[in-house]
Image: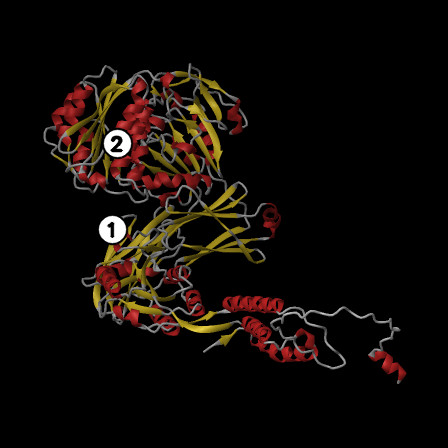
Amino acid sequence: MIQFSHPEAFLMVPLWGVAAWMLPRAELWKPLRILTGLLLMLAWANPHLPRQSRGLDVWMLVDRSSSAAEWIEPRLPEMESLLEQSRGRHDRLFFVDFAEDVIVRETISEAILSGRMDATHIGGALQYTLSRLDPGRHSRLLMVTDGFSTEPLEDAALRLNRENVPMDLRLIAPVDVTDFRVDELRAPNPVRPGEAFILEARVFGNADADVPVELWRDGQRVGGGVAAVRRGRAAVRWSEVLPRPGAVEYEVRILPETDAWAGNNRQTRWVEARGGRRLLLVTAYADDPMVPVLRAQGVEVELVTDPARLRPGHLTGTAAVVIHNVPAYDLPNPFIDALPFYVREQGGGLAMIGGRLSFGAGGYYQSSVDELLPVSMELKEEHRRLSVAMAIVMDRSGSMAAGVPGAPGMTKMGLANEGAAQAIELLGDRDAVTVFAVDTSPHVIVPMTTLGENREQITGMVRRIQSHGGGIYVYEGLKAGWEELQKAEQGQRHIILFSDASDSERPQGYERIVDDMLADNATLSVIALGNERDRHADLLKEIAARGQGRIMFNDDAATLPSIFAQETVALSRSAFLDEPVALQATAGWQELAAAQLNWPAQVDGYNLSYLRPEATAGLLSADEYEAPLVAHWTRGTGRVAAIAFPTGGEYSESVRAWPQYADFVRTVFGWILRPELPPGLALRHERVGETLNVELLYDESWEDTFARTPPRLLTAAGVDLEGRTHVWRRIAPGTFQTRLDMAGTPMLRGALQVGNRAMPFGPLTAGTGAEWRFDPAMPRALRQMSEVSGGVNRIDLASIWEAPRRVELRGIRNALLLATLLAFLAEALWTRLDGQRPSVDFRAGKAPKRPRFRKPKPEKPQAAPETVPPQPEVKRRTVFDQARRR
């Protein structure tokens, strides 16, 4: 049926008749002029004619989320092939994959989704697809999913109806399966140290059963029990005590015999034990002499001599962290990576104290702590006393060809190559290097060569090493590296063995090689790709221990370049000077204390480093280096100090005998402790599902302060080094509020900043996400959306090409305007060819007849004209004269 956009245009018909009667001279009654007016009127009315599309565009949206992948992916190739084979010549088929993010792909092999897979954003996928439809073709959507969306669908439903696009459903989910899940883990937060509290786990299931339950704390199993699921639910409780301040992560796991989804069998929760201001002392000495000094001042000290147990949660409630002669490779990476946010944003203090395993010698170069320290640890070339010969034995087995999450386009081999190349770049011109790539046999990449002008060529060769063959033969690699290293003339010789902790083979006989190295004063260290639970981890530990070297496990291949750099700096570009050195006081100490100390005459040794720009030195060495022995600065809202000489253990006798030792310790560590905020300020947070509601409560004493400097809220997900700023919303006098999305966040840490002070909070977790809750309301809402849009539950996929297609109305205004122009030109041409017409005779009341064109006759000869006498002029009377006479 024809539809008109402007039916008022038909009023032109009576108007045209009136104009033709009132303006007869315009001759509007002529056929061409009537046709022109009629076409113009129709163009104004803008008629739309019904038309059916020749082809159909089908957009197949495929749910690739974690909860649906097990059921959908095995059927996906068959479904896509069926749709492709049954479509018509003018039909088109498109594929859209979605989980948290959305991507359009060509074939099943090209489905590469970024973002989290434990989210089902059906609404976002619909919005994305609708924005890509061709408005000139008829489109239909086919949604293949389990129906459990993790986001609201209202906005997508409104747009689907507004754009009149039908959506068919193909719901694929297991039917009549047994599933159990941990719905929630409840705990009070915070708690007091030493006081008991209750943990409660709520377990849901669709069958009656006794389900085993385990309770874990910071990665260690601390309890168990049985959840007696009856009528769909059960609860298990434990009594817990946290003996000291800090935060610990609790995890509940269920172990059902029959279970459809394993992804919802666990829940986590952080619990904070809140005490007074606490200093975390990570030290190599169980009797560290600084502990009694600090405790006598009233500082609560937590002594840690087993750094492997440290977690980011240990930073909660901690006012400062002190690292005393503990190497970086003994500290867990998550703990080290959490320190930058802790210092810069949460206002925590940090101090590093010297020793043979501290600063650059302890592997802190290019670590997360490096840029926090007020001193640089890389030894200058002119200060090096011994040249180094290094053999790098690299694993190039088949496992090294695997890709690396978080490093698109990179392989383990590529990152290991980059690490070895960076290690070579850090060596000096007088140093020498040899590189072997090992699988089932060693392959010489670079023979023993002094760097000098060869550095660029050598690093280029190393960066081109390719992965081949089976596992690495450890003995063959060590043997080849030692044989080449024996050719070197440098005074210090070292082997770096890089190997996959799960794929290191044929070690038989390595003991003899390592013993020969030790007898010849050579050293050995191991970089192991993996963790201590891998099958060949113990072998690599034995090799490092026998070689009296260190082993660094790393299960994040993306950080391999920095680990190679740390090991190289620790070997060749760091120095602990073990001879007594005199001291030189500076005015910088008075930034920490009002008066100078009576410094001791000397210290027994120190780590050579260099003062960074903007940092302040409080004490210098009185030798050729004039190195900073005490340095400090502020980083963000936190304070950092570096003490280059040992204050405990060996090389600390002179310092510990110093009468003002206690004053020195109290001054430095009192300065780095996080200052407390004044009263009248409180931070309250509540977790609702995957959303964290944060409220800032303050009294009238803070009004002027906030007017000058608004408060800032920063958060970091996991152990991210950088924080994210959030916007406050004032909801009432004395109250700010904001909401944080915790979806997919394993751990959230935050800080409220007011000027140069901070109030930390966290860590917090969102627990198991909505992906595993299987809200039954979501499939019902999706079915309703499909019905309202004109879609069906599509069991036979091939029949989608036979679905009724929407009849579209196409406007013909442009064609009518073109026809109007042609009619106007035709009428103008006809008028021009018709010649001039005489004027209208008003007395007759009608137009004169049109003269006819006739064929001219032959002219006759004419007689001479007669002379006619002139006649008198007769005045012509007009209509107006006659009216005047009457």
- Residue 607 spot, x, y in % from top left: 37, 23
Task: Give the distance between the C-alpha atoms of the residues marked 1 and 2, in whole angstroms.
Answer: 45 Å
- Residue 302 spot, x, y in % from top left: 37, 39
In the rendered structure, find residue 464 and report the number of the disc placed on it: 2
The number of numbered badges drawn on the structure is: 2
- Residue 142 spot, x, y in % from top left: 32, 66
- Residue 674 spot, x, y in % from top left: 47, 39
Point 57% across, 66% down: residue: 825
Counting residues from the start of the chain, the first of labels 1 and 2 encountered is 1
Q: Secondary structure at mark 2?
A: loop
**Which residue occupies the foreground of this view, 206 or 785?**
785
Q: Amino acid at mark 1?
A: Arg
Q: Amino acid at mark 2?
A: Arg
Is residue 113 visible in this depiction of the protein? Answer: yes
Residue contact between numbered discs 1 and 2, judged by CB atoms under 8 Å:
no
* Disc number lying in front (1 or 2): 2
Residue 10 higher or lower than 130, as above or below? below
Query: Mark 1 = which residue?
Result: 221
Specify whether 853 is left or right of 240.
right
Q: Quadrant of the C terminus?
A: bottom right
Residue 886 higher or lower than 795, as above or below? below
**Which residue occupies the foreground of this view, 297 or 46?**
46
Residue 375 higher or lower than 145, as above or below? above
**Which residue occupies the foreground of this view, 295 or 835?**
835
**Which residue occupies the foreground of this view, 368 or 390?**
390
